[in-house]
Amino acid sequence: MAFDKFASSQSGEGDLTETLLPDTNNGERSVMISRRRRFGNFTVFLVLQVCCLGIYTAAFFSLMPKAGRVNLVYSPAAGAVKLEKVRFNATLVIESPYNGPPSDEVDAAWTALLDNMNIAVPKSDLDRVGTASIRIPGTDNMYFAGLSVFHELHCLKRLRQYTWKDHYFPDMSAEDERLNRLHTDHCLEILRQAAMCRADISLFTLQWSEKTTQPRADFSQEHECVNFDAIFQWAGRHRVDAGKPGLLVHPIHGPAYPDGTSSKIGATEDMSPTVIES
Ligand SMILES: *[C@@H]1O[C@H](CO)[C@@H](O)[C@H](O)[C@H]1NC(C)=O
């Protein structure tokens, strides 16, 4: 019976599979054929996998700038990001040009730190993050922008000033006091979000001291930091003086800073619609 079946199958189409088959019955043969097909499918699957891996690897490396960060959000300054280890100064009293009671030196240090707050970016940068801004007059389609780290530093400057309120904000009206309070609270929330956004996961430790019963913390540890100097210099190369008298002109109301100064409070509750420039 087995021979008969084999003989009848020999008289079949005689495809390539047939010649490779030992003398066997139809049941086993069909298993062999489907194995062959499966092997064919597997090759296609393997080739597809290799292709996918290639595409994935290419995408991975193209999304990874030199510093090894993945850009979920586009920034034209991504190329200026250099990571480095930095040990924080974390004693109770810290010597720093930005620290201490009001003085011309401390004020000058903060002013210099915020010098590259405003930069010029091409329209294509705004398009890549899906946002809009004010066009810079007299340029070839460049727009006002800034790196967020400088807004955070501006907020720290505000908070420091608020701790010396009588010096920095003297003789204010009740309304200005109220707006100043709102600006301060805004800055606290900005810095909370920034700290949680960066989520620095470097460790701090505890130690016993000879004098006190309770442990003291050691925050003078190494952190993974972006080299700030490189970012500051990148911003400096794209710097634009937004406060330059007459540069920023409101389409309806005219020059924004006719004499180069802005409001000391710097906060607004204005929620009116955005005016689109023509
Ligand atoms: C710590 O203090 C030293 C000396 O004042 C200074 O050079 C260094 O930049 C400070 N480090 C940080 C992270 O601020």
Image (spheres, rainbow, N blue to C red):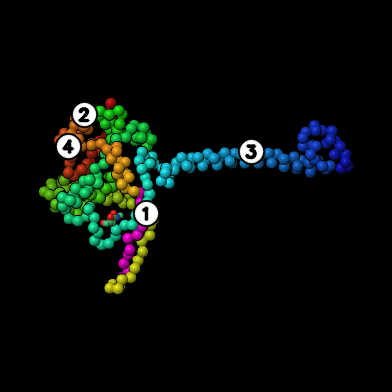
The three-letter code of the residue at mark 1 reads: Lys
Tell me the mark number nearer the camera, choosing from 1 and 3: 1
Q: Earlier in the sequence, mark 1 or mark 3?
A: 3
The region drawn magenta spans: 214-226
Magenta span main SS: strand
The residue that label 1 is drawn on is 85
Q: Which class describes the residues within 10 Å of circle 2: few (<14), some (14-19), or many (20+)?
A: few
Residue at 36 percent across and 38 percent down: it is: 76
Seen from the viewer's position, the closer of residues 92 and 172 is: 92
Q: Position of residue 82 (x, y in %)?
A: 37, 47
Q: Which class describes the residues within 10 Å of circle 3: few (<14), some (14-19), or many (20+)?
A: few
Q: Earlier in the sequence, mark 2 or mark 4?
A: 2
User: SS class of the residue under badge 4?
Assistant: loop
The residue that label 3 is drawn on is 44
User: SS class of the residue under badge 1?
Assistant: strand
Please tell me the numbered disc located at residue 260: 4
Distance from disc 2 to disc 4, alpha carbons, whole Å, reads: 19 Å
The three-letter code of the residue at mark 3 reads: Val
Please tell me the numbered disc located at residue 134: none
Tell me the mark number nearer the camera, choosing from 3 and 2: 3
Q: Earlier in the sequence, mark 1 or mark 2?
A: 1
